[in-house]
Every structure is written in structure tokens, then in C-alpha cells.
Image (spheres, rainbow, N blue to C red):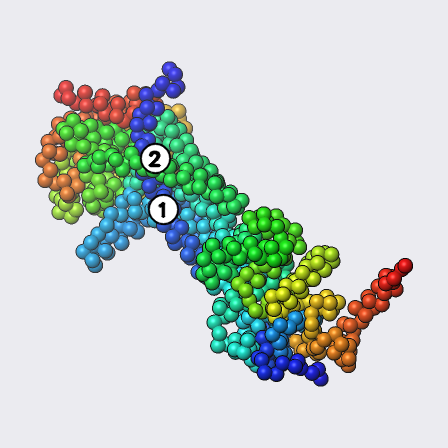
């Protein structure tokens, strides 16, 4: 059994309690009795293969999907009692393969949630410029269309869009999966810095354990709809679960191999 | 003679503002109505596969109905509805011209808009729609801010197709009383005025092309995010609409509408009547190319004020009478019945009959030694006969066959204009022609006598709508025509009108006709 975080009094940013969700009239059990807390300020990565239920778990948090059983609390409130539209506008969401609106400019994409919230145009414009700087895009990119940008630039726009309405929580669905390794690394590091400096709570889905360990504070492992382990890298390395061990094997082997290939002091 | 100096070009040109304006008005109304129905319908049915298939199926079936038939079907349908409305609410409406044309054309325009809207919306990447939901859009916001803008190029392509179809098909609304560029084509075909036919086709094609290109500009603007293209396209469309509609808006409303059916004689007579009214200071305009049933109903309901019909046609088609009567008896019976039943006034007869008659070349008749249908009957079995599209289903044909025991080897249906040439060249042996046709003299044909009087009389009579019944100025203007046009005169007039040269326009022939009549 994995132990919980030290914050006892403050409500977790997201709390899943015995959550279950089935699809296709109960034939597919996507999420099976999962309980999981994401503390405020935490960077949690959810790792699992395809069909493990990790995306469903993420979407339960902003009510893109409603649970069949159990409860989901966001910042102390049961999501069933919250207007789902307002909930989604208050939570940043970064989509797999960017999910940008192709008919809107970069500026239009970034400013979409503030616009939905009725923010005055002038304010949106200022905010868009701030965000373009924040995610290290160039100001002239603002009037371009998504298809005119590279994959990495597009995903930076995706991150900027998620942050536009100043959310406390950001959900990321395999955000860097489609990028080349260099871009992916740079973007991951940049995002992690933003997460820290803005004091965000982040839940990121990935199938890549190495990425999860390098970016996140804590990792939750999903398999066939069940949460099989959660905790820091150290916690996971102590897990007795065979699947977790298998997932950790790859980064371990990579680390050892790299250690051999790239000795620290060659002087 | 120089092709372009033909006065028929300038004649065609002077009619353009009226025809083009009416054409644009009916097309625009039909497109707007079609869009207003099909666009929301597409949004409603797109997520319901069964409903969607039904709607698209029905729209496809409508599309397979020939345009002319669809337009023709809407006329009786609206007529019945107008009757019901009058009965239930005490308020009728005109089932003539604009309304049936707009409804039929709107129905015709629906398929491309429906199909493209549904296809366009379904073709959007589901990840984009998911993203719209994820950033916090409502269903409606997702539709208006993301899905519709993304589907717009496909939807615009559908609107373009619909616009071209509607503009093309609107030329067929002439026979149900809607003035359009089709007036050139119908009038031109009937009076062998190829200048008119060509002019009508080119004008309709140019209009369709212009609208298509302007819509293409807007479509391109939408696709390429070019505001300039969109603005130019919209301005161009607006300019086109304003320029075409302005003259017909500014035009003084004519008081008297003179109807004409779809054959040469009718074009000439309506032109003659319009000219006489204008001379008398009564503003008049012709409404040409109307179907035989449409024109009678239009007169009864006051959509047109005056036209020339034939006693036997009304007797059989409108009153559904079959008994054979003498010319005088039939006319007086008809006059009373039309007055009592419809409030229509028979002003009087023009002086000639345009009856069906069996016709063959004079030489051939002499060879065979026949002068009457009675002579023909025993020799008919190896011969062939041709008639127009309705003759063989008319009561006259049944009566003829019965009373003379007629039986031919072969029956053929033909375009009336070609019938006479066919019998003159021996292609067919006998035709069911019209007694007033100028081609009888031209080809030296003879009309066979009808000793048993089985063909009813077809006196050309001037009819006046109920609302003009007490109009003395109208009666006085037309009285000089009554009884003045004999069979030889109308044959010559019809022959002139079929001449295919610059003096053959109905207006020119009508002026010639008046000169002859005025001397009497």
C-alpha cells in the first residue's frame, strides 16, 4: 500500500473516490474503483498502456465524462454539483496532437476560453501577448494559422491556450507524444518550469514511464481500469506489482546504458 | 442581312429589365426559402441516421422529378390550397406565377444544401469537436464557433450548386405564369424566333455563371481566411441583385394583364389586344406562354384580365361536356355557363375557328379522291396519322373514330410545327392539324370536311376576368376586333409569325393584322 501525502487539512485539488466508469453498456470497464488524490501544486503523471483507462480518468476530472459510481471532487466540490461548462473553463486542458481550431489564428486559439468567459477584447489581447511570451513563441506568430506552425510550436500554442484563463489546474492528454525527442524534451522542461512558477496543479497522461519520472513529482500507474500503484519514483521502485516493475525496467536499463555510454568525467 | 442588326435583338433587349428582374426575384426568393428550410433541417437531422437518410432520400427523389413537371404540379396543389383557405379563413391567395414557382424551386434547391451541410459537419475531425468541448464551449458555441465555420466551404459549395440549379430551372416557371428569362425561350420556340431562344439561353447562363463565380469568391475567401474576397463577393452579389431588381421595382405597375397560351396564334392575338388597350390609354402587358389549364384558372381568379380561348376547348376541358352542339348553340350555352359558374365574361368571337381538322396534301387527296372524313374512312387502314401531344387523348378523336369508324395503321405524336412539313413530305399520310394554321396554305394542304359534325366548333373568343366584367373602357377598346378576323386573315398572320425573320415578331404581326382589320 502506498502512503498518502502529508497535506491533511487542505482539500486536494482533485480527489477521486471509488470511481467507476463503463462504456458500451457495461461491456468495457474503463475505470474500475479508482481512488486517487492530487494535492494542490502537485505534478502527477498517469502512466498506462492504451485502453488502461488513463484518458477516461483524466476526463472525469472536468466532467467531459461522468462517473457511473463513486465521486470526483475538484477543489473540494463534488463535480456533479458544478456546471460542467464553467468547470471546463476553469481547468486548463492540453490535447493530444494539439487540438487547435484550424480556422482561428494563434491569437484566436489562445484567447478562446477568456472569450467564452466574456473577457473584454482588449484584456484578451494583452493576455494573449503575455502567453505568447510565456510559452516562448514569437509575437508575429499571433496572426498565423495553426497549419503554418511546426508541431512543437503548435503544442506551445496548446499550452498557452490551456493557461489563458489562469486556471489552477491543468490536465494534459499525452501532450508531447507526437513530437520529435528534442522538441519533446525542451517543451517538457519548459512546461515544468511554468508549472512551478505559476503554482499549478498538473495531471499529465503519458504511456512513457521515462517521461513521467523525469517531469512529474508523482506517478500513478493504471492497468485495465485499475490503479495499480502511485507515488514518487522511489515509492514505485519499492512496489511489488509485476507490471510496475516491468514499466520501470525500461528507464532503468536506459539509465544504465547511458551511464556506460556517457561517462560523467572524461577528463 | 447582318446577324446583329436584326431588330429582334433590340426587341429582346428592351424586354431584358423586366424578364431579368423577375427571374432574379423568383430565384432569390426560392433560394432564400430553400436555405431557410434545408439548413436548419440539416442541423436537426445530422445526428439521427434514420431521419437523415429519410430527409436526404426525399430530397433526392424531388430532384429526379423533371423541373417542368415539379413546377406544373405545384400549380394545382396551390390552387386547391387556395380554395381551402378561402373556404376556411375567407381569405384566398394567388396560386399563379410567383408563389408556385418559388415553392417548387425552393424544393428543388434543397438537396445540395442539405447534403453538403450534413457532409461538411460530419467531415470535421472529432478531435477538434472534443477540443471545443474541452475548452468549455456549450453545444451551441461549438456549432457556431467551430463546426459551422469549418464546414462553411463545403456548405458554400452546396449553396453554389443550388443557386445554379435554381437559376437554370427558373426558366421553366414561364408556363405557370411567372415571368422569367424563360419567356424568351418559350416565346422563341413557339414563334420560331431563334434570336429570342438564343438570347434567353445566354442571359440565363450568364446570370447563373455570374452568381456562381461571386459565390465561389466568397467560398474561396472563407477557405483562405481572406476577408477581402468575402467582402468583394458579397458586394458583387448585392450589386447584381440591386441592378437587376431596380428597373422592375421602378416600373409602373401595369393595369391590364393579357394572357397567352403557348402557341404562335396566341402570342399574336395577345400582342394585338395589348396594342389596342395601349392605344385606348389602358396600360397593358402580356403574360405569355401559359399552360392551357393555368391560363383559365388565372383568368377566373383575376391574375390575368383577358385572353383568347376557343369555344370547343372550354366546352370539353373546363365544362367537361361531351355532347355535340352547333356553333351558335354551343357558344350561347358556354357564355351563360362561364358567367354563372366563374363570373367570366365572353366578350365575343373574333370571327375564325381554330379547330382540329384532318389535313393532307391537296395532290394526295385528289389522287385518293377524298374530300371528307367520310371518304377517308374506308381507305384509312393502310395510312398513318400524326397529331399533337394531346390530340389522341382528346374527346374529339374518340368521337371521330366512333362516328366514322376510323382506324389507321399507325398513330404518331409530333411537335405541331413539324407536323405540317411531315405530311407535306409524305412522312405521314394524314395529320390532325389546326384550321387556322398558316402552314396549311404554305404547304398546299386541304382540310377534310366533317359531314357528321363530330368535331365541336372552336370559335376564338375573347374572355374577360370577373373583376373586369363591368369595365366599359376595356370593352370599347376591344370591340373593334370582334368578328373582324376571318380564317384567311388569321392563317396569313400565323404564317407571318412563323416566318423566322425580323418581321415575324408577334408585335409586328399584330400591327400588320390591325392594319388589315382597321380597313374593314
Q: Mark 2 packing: few (<14 Cα in 10 Å), some, or many (20+)?
A: few
Pinpoint residue A267: horizontal percent, then vertical percent. Answer: 90, 59
Nearer-the-camera pick, B242 or A88: A88
Pinpoint residue B225: horizontal percent, then vertical percent. Answer: 52, 46
Please give the residue where the numbered disc 1 appears in the rendered image: B30
Can residue B41 be seen here? The reply is: yes
Residue at (60%, 74%) from the top-left corner? A40
Residue B303 vs B37, above or below: the answer is above
Nearer-the-camera pick, A217 or B384: A217
Can residue B360 be seen here? The reply is: no
Please give the residue where the numbered disc 2 appears in the rendered image: B243
Q: Chain of mark 1?
A: B
Give the mark nearer the N terminus: 2 vs 1.
1
In this rendering, position of residue B302 left or right of residue B4:
left
Q: Chain of mark 2?
A: B
Residue B367 vs A236, above or below: the answer is above
In this rendering, position of residue A257 left or right of residue A7:
right
Q: Which mark is residue B252?
A: none
When asked about the image quadrant of residue B441, the answer is top left
Residue A120 vs A12, above or below: the answer is above
Amino acid at each position: 500500500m502506498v502512503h498518502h501525502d502529508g497535506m491533511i487539512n487542505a482539500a486536494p485539488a482533485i480527489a477521486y473516490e471509488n470511481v467507476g466508469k463503463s462504456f458500451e453498456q457495461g461491456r468495457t470497464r474503463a475505470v474500475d474503483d479508482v481512488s486517487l488524490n492530487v494535492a494542490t501544486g502537485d505534478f502527477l503523471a498517469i502512466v498506462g498502456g492504451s485502453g488502461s483507462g488513463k484518458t477516461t480518468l483524466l476526463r472525469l476530472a472536468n466532467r467531459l465524462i461522468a462517473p457511473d459510481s463513486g465521486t470526483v471532487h475538484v477543489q473540494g466540490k463534488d463535480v456533479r454539483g458544478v456546471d460542467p461548462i464553467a468547470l471546463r473553463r476553469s481547468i486548463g486542458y492540453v490535447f493530444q496532437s494539439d487540438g487547435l481550431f484550424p480556422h482561428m489564428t494563434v491569437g484566436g486559439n489562445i484567447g478562446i476560453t477568456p472569450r467564452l468567459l466574456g473577457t473584454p477584447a482588449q484584456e484578451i489581447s494583452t493576455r494573449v501577448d503575455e502567453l505568447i511570451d510565456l510559452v516562448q513563441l514569437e509575437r508575429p506568430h499571433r496572426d498565423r494559422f495553426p497549419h503554418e506552425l511546426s508541431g512543437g510550436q503548435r503544442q506551445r500554442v496548446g499550452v498557452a491556450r490551456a493557461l489563458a484563463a489562469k486556471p489552477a489546474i491543468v490536465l494534459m492528454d499525452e501532450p508531447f507524444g507526437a513530437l520529435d525527442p528534442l522538441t519533446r524534451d525542451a517543451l517538457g522542461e519548459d512546461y515544468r518550469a511554468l508549472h512551478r512558477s505559476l503554482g499549478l496543479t498538473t495531471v499529465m497522461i503519458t504511456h512513457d514511464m521515462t517521461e513521467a519520472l523525469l517531469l512529474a513529482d508523482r506517478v500513478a500507474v493504471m492497468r485495465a481500469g485499475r490503479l495499480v500503484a502511485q507515488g514518487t519514483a522511489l515509492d514505485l521502485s519499492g512496489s511489488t506489482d509485476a507490471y510496475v516493475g516491468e514499466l520501470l525496467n525500461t528507464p532503468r536499463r536506459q539509465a544504465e546504458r547511458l551511464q556506460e555510454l556517457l561517462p560523467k568525467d572524461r577528463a | 442581312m447582318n446577324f446583329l442588326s436584326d431588330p429582334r435583338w433590340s426587341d429582346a433587349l428592351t424586354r431584358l429589365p423586366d424578364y431579368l428582374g423577375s427571374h432574379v426575384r423568383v430565384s432569390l426568393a426560392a433560394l432564400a426559402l430553400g436555405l431557410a428550410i434545408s439548413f436548419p433541417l440539416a442541423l436537426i437531422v445530422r445526428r439521427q441516421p434514420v431521419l437523415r437518410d429519410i430527409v436526404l432520400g426525399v430530397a433526392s427523389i424531388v430532384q429526379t422529378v423533371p423541373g417542368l413537371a415539379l413546377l406544373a404540379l405545384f400549380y394545382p396543389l396551390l390552387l386547391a390550397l387556395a380554395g381551402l383557405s378561402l373556404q376556411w379563413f375567407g381569405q384566398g391567395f394567388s396560386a399563379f406565377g410567383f408563389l408556385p414557382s418559388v415553392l417548387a424551386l425552393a424544393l428543388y434547391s434543397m438537396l445540395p444544401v442539405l447534403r453538403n451541410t450534413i457532409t461538411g459537419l460530419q467531415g470535421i475531425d472529432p478531435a477538434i469537436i472534443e477540443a471545443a468541448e474541452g475548452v468549455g464551449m456549450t453545444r451551441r458555441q461549438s456549432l457556431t464557433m467551430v463546426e459551422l465555420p469549418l464546414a462553411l466551404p463545403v456548405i458554400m459549395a452546396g449553396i453554389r450548386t443550388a443557386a445554379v440549379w435554381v437559376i437554370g430551372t427558373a426558366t421553366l416557371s414561364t408556363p405557370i405564369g411567372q415571368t422569367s428569362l424563360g419567356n424568351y425561350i418559350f416565346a422563341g420556340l413557339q414563334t420560331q424566333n431563334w434570336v429570342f431562344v438564343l438570347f434567353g439561353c445566354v442571359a440565363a447562363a450568364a446570370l447563373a455563371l455570374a452568381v456562381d463565380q461571386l459565390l465561389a469568391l466568397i467560398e474561396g475567401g472563407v477557405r483562405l481566411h481572406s476577408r477581402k474576397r468575402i467582402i468583394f463577393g458579397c458586394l458583387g452579389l448585392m450589386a447584381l441583385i440591386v441592378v437587376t431588381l431596380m428597373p422592375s421595382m421602378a416600373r409602373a405597375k401595369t393595369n391590364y394583364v393579357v394572357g397567352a397560351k403557348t402557341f404562335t396564334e396566341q402570342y399574336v392575338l395577345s400582342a394585338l389586344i395589348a396594342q389596342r388597350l395601349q392605344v385606348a390609354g389602358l396600360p397593358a402587358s402580356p403574360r405569355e406562354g401559359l399552360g392551357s389549364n393555368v391560363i383559365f384558372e388565372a383568368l377566373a381568379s383575376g391574375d390575368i384580365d383577358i385572353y383568347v380561348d376557343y369555344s370547343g376547348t372550354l366546352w370539353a376541358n373546363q365544362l367537361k361536356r361531351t355532347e355535340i352542339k352547333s356553333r351558335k348553340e354551343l357558344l350561347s350555352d358556354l357564355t351563360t355557363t362561364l358567367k354563372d359558374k366563374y363570373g367570366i365574361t365572353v366578350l365575343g368571337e373574333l370571327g375564325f375557328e381554330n379547330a382540329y381538322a384532318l389535313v393532307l396534301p391537296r395532290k394526295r387527296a385528289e389522287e385518293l379522291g377524298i374530300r371528307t372524313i367520310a371518304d377517308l374512312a374506308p381507305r384509312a387502314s393502310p395510312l398513318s396519322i400524326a397529331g399533337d401531344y394531346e390530340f389522341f387523348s382528346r374527346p374529339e378523336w374518340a368521337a371521330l373514330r366512333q362516328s366514322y369508324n376510323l382506324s389507321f395503321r399507325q398513330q404518331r405524336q409530333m411537335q405541331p410545327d413539324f407536323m405540317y412539313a411531315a405530311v407535306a413530305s409524305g412522312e405521314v399520310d394524314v395529320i390532325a392539324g389546326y384550321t387556322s394554321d398558316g402552314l396549311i396554305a404554305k404547304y398546299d394542304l386541304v382540310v377534310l370536311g366533317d359531314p357528321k359534325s363530330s368535331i365541336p366548333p372552336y370559335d376564338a373568343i375573347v374572355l374577360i376576368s370577373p373583376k373586369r366584367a363591368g369595365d366599359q373602357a376595356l370593352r370599347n377598346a376591344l370591340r373593334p376586333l370582334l368578328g373582324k378576323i376571318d380564317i384567311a386573315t388569321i392563317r396569313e398572320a400565323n404564317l407571318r409569325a412563323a416566318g423566322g425573320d425580323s418581321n415575324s415578331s408577334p408585335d409586328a404581326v399584330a400591327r400588320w393584322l390591325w392594319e388589315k382589320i382597321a380597313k374593314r
